[in-house]
Image: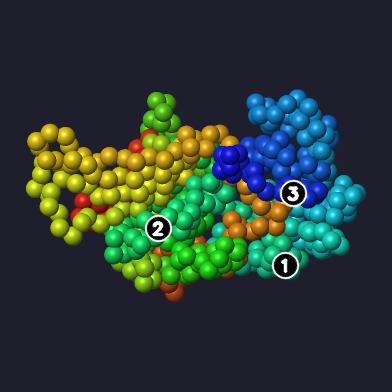
């Protein structure tokens, strides 16, 4: 009996070739929470076998200490004791600062015997240019004969268009574009990939995926957590830079893109780029009616009292950094003309959830509008996290003589249909980089185009270096709403939806 490859993770693909993987900034939180657990899962699944994983950081760790730390990181994961020990035996540690050329000159010794080399930048963003430059000037960017050299760069890719262009220029000085993998882990989530399958693999959706049938689209990236220990970083970022420019815009692009000619990486990325470039500048011309920014105050989350943003560690007590953004954007395309895309993201909201919901228009003749229970809009909701799945809301007649309608759900759950074998995002993306598949990675022109749009909003807010005296921020630029932690966000966000009974989806 043939099995669905989704039900067993990454089955159906050949293992990666032997490689040396260098993780720069290996002592950070990303390695502990995501990278080592993902690499171990790939090892247990047989996706990677002969590999050397070298941590590169300034802390005075030994190889044995790194292995001991990694053992804690994978505790509780599936796998036998023998598999754990075999995996840990492949780990090594190179102690060096990011500025010291001597550390980079030692890297070939650690990678001896491996012609394939993968670099992962898990450092603070301000260290990216230094690490990239040192890799290049020490001759470590050029591929070995019959091998590859690739580099994975974590977000953020700059903090505005100017810095993104500068970072890309540094990368291109030492690497070719096909060697560079800019990671957005949302694209590695199975449900995001399923968006394309849902649209292009089912005959019932694509014919109605346009402005004739769709009233609006909502994209929600909500978090119940606050900034935690990242107050200093968040002060220089904010919700618009941290979530909208990358995650939310990528979800929008996958939702709205035209069918690609084929499934080649650049064919898909070309179509995503067209969507980002089609963003209508009306959002910039009329920011007051298209953008809401806000900051969380103290409140209660999951039954526990939590501090407001201004009381978080590392945050300026007079900060105007936004922790919530809602946007109404339009796409200047034939398919989507007139359809608002309503995008929101925020911290300390009532629930952690990421989803894309497509809200269809009412039928042209509303025969049942006079009923006490009138039909609601049909809504197709794609849950990215948690509880990955898809629901379709439609109307059904209430049994009996009333003749009223009640919304009912058709619900598809990944956990129910495919079990627990669906790979985590970092598993998929790391394995794709090892295989040379950059479909789920973002290209430099996508990043620069999205920053070009975001910069105009930052100009209106007066929170970017590109604002100038000749183009002063408008009077409302610093208007910053407040919302209580543990709620769905500021009341002002409801005004973006307009009339005709539109409302934000319940978190």
Which residue bears the numbered disc 2?
203
Among numbered discs 1 and 2, the one appearing first in the sequence: 1
Front: mark 1 or 2: 2
**Circle number at residue 176:** 1
* Left or right side of 348 for 396: left
Measuring 43% from the left and 31% from the top, which residue is drawn there?
306
Picture coordinates of residue 228, whole percent (x, y) = 53, 37
Q: Quadrant of residue 351?
A: top left
Q: Quadrant of residue 354?
A: top left
Position of residue 89 relative to residue 142, above or below, is: above
Measuring 27% from the left and 39% from the top, which residue is drawn there?
408
Dot 1: element: loop
Q: Is residue 226 visible?
A: no
Which residue bears the numbered disc 3?
16
Label 3, residues with CA under 10 Å away: few <14, some 14-19, many ≥20: some
Front: mark 3 or 2: 2
Residue at the extreme front of the image, as rendered:
1
Dots 3 and 2: beta carbons under 8 Å?
no
Dots 3 and 1: beta carbons under 8 Å?
no
Alpha-carbon span between mark 3 and mark 1:
21 Å
Among numbered discs 3 and 2, the one appearing first in the sequence: 3
Q: Which residue is more in the foreground, 396 or 345?
A: 396
Position of residue 344 relative to residue 256, above or below, is: above
**Circle number at residue 232:** none
Front: mark 3 or 1: 3
Among numbered discs 3 and 1, the one appearing first in the sequence: 3
Dot 2: element: loop
């Amino acid at each position: 009996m043939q099995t669905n490859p989704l039900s067993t993770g990454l089955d159906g693909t050949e293992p990666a070739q032997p490689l040396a993987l260098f993780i720069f900034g290996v002592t950070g939180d990303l390695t502990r929470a995501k990278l080592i657990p993902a690499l171990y899962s790939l090892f247990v699944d047989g996706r990677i076998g002969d590999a050397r994983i070298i941590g590169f950081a300034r802390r005075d760790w030994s190889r044995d200490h790194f292995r001991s730390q990694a053992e804690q990181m994978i505790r509780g994961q599936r796998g036998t004791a023998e598999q754990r020990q075999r995996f840990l035996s492949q780990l090594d540690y190179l102690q060096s600062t990011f500025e010291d050329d001597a550390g980079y000159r030692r890297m070939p010794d650690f990678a001896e015997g491996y012609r394939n080399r993968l670099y992962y930048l898990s450092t603070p963003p301000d260290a990216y240019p230094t690490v990239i430059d040192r890799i290049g000037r020490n001759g470590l960017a050029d591929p070995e004969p019959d091998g590859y050299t690739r580099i994975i760069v974590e977000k953020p890719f700059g903090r505005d268009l100017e810095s993104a262009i500068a970072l890309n220029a540094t990368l291109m000085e030492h690497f070719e574009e096909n060697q560079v993998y800019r990671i957005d882990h949302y694209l590695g989530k199975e449900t995001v990939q399923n968006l394309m399958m849902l649209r292009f693999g089912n005959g019932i959706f694509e014919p109605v995926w346009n402005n004739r049938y769709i009233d609006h689209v909502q994209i929600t990236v909500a978090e119940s957590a606050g900034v935690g220990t990242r107050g200093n970083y968040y002060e220089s970022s904010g919700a618009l830079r941290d979530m909208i420019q990358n995650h939310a815009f990528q979800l929008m692009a996958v939702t709205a893109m035209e069918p690609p000619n084929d499934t080649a990486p650049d064919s898909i990325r070309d179509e995503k780029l067209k969507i980002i470039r089609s963003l209508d500048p009306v959002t910039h011309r009329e920011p007051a009616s298209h953008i809401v920014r806000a900051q969380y105050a103290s409140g209660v989350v999951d039954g526990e009292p939590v501090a407001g943003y201004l009381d978080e560690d590392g945050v300026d007590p007079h900060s105007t950094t936004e922790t919530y953004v809602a946007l109404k954007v339009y796409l200047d395309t034939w398919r989507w003309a007139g359809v608002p895309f309503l995008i929101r993201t925020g911290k300390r909201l009532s629930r952690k959830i990421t989803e894309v919901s497509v809200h269809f228009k009412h039928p042209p003749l509303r025969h049942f509008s006079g009923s006490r229970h009138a039909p609601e809009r049909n809504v197709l909701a794609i849950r990215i996290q948690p509880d990955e799945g898809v629901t379709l809301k439609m109307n059904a007649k209430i049994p009996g003589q009333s003749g009223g309608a009640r919304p009912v759900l058709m619900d598809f759950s990944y956990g129910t249909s495919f079990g627990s074998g669906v790979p985590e995002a970092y598993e998929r993306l790391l394995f794709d980089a090892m295989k040379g598949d950059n479909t789920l990675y973002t290209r430099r022109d996508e990043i620069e185009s999205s920053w070009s749009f975001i910069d105009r909003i930052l100009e209106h807010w007066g929170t970017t270096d590109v604002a100038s005296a000749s183009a002063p921020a408008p009077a409302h630029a610093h208007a910053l709403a407040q919302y209580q932690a543990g709620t769905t966000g500021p009341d002002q966000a409801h005004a973006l939806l307009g009339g005709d009974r539109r409302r934000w989806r319940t978190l």
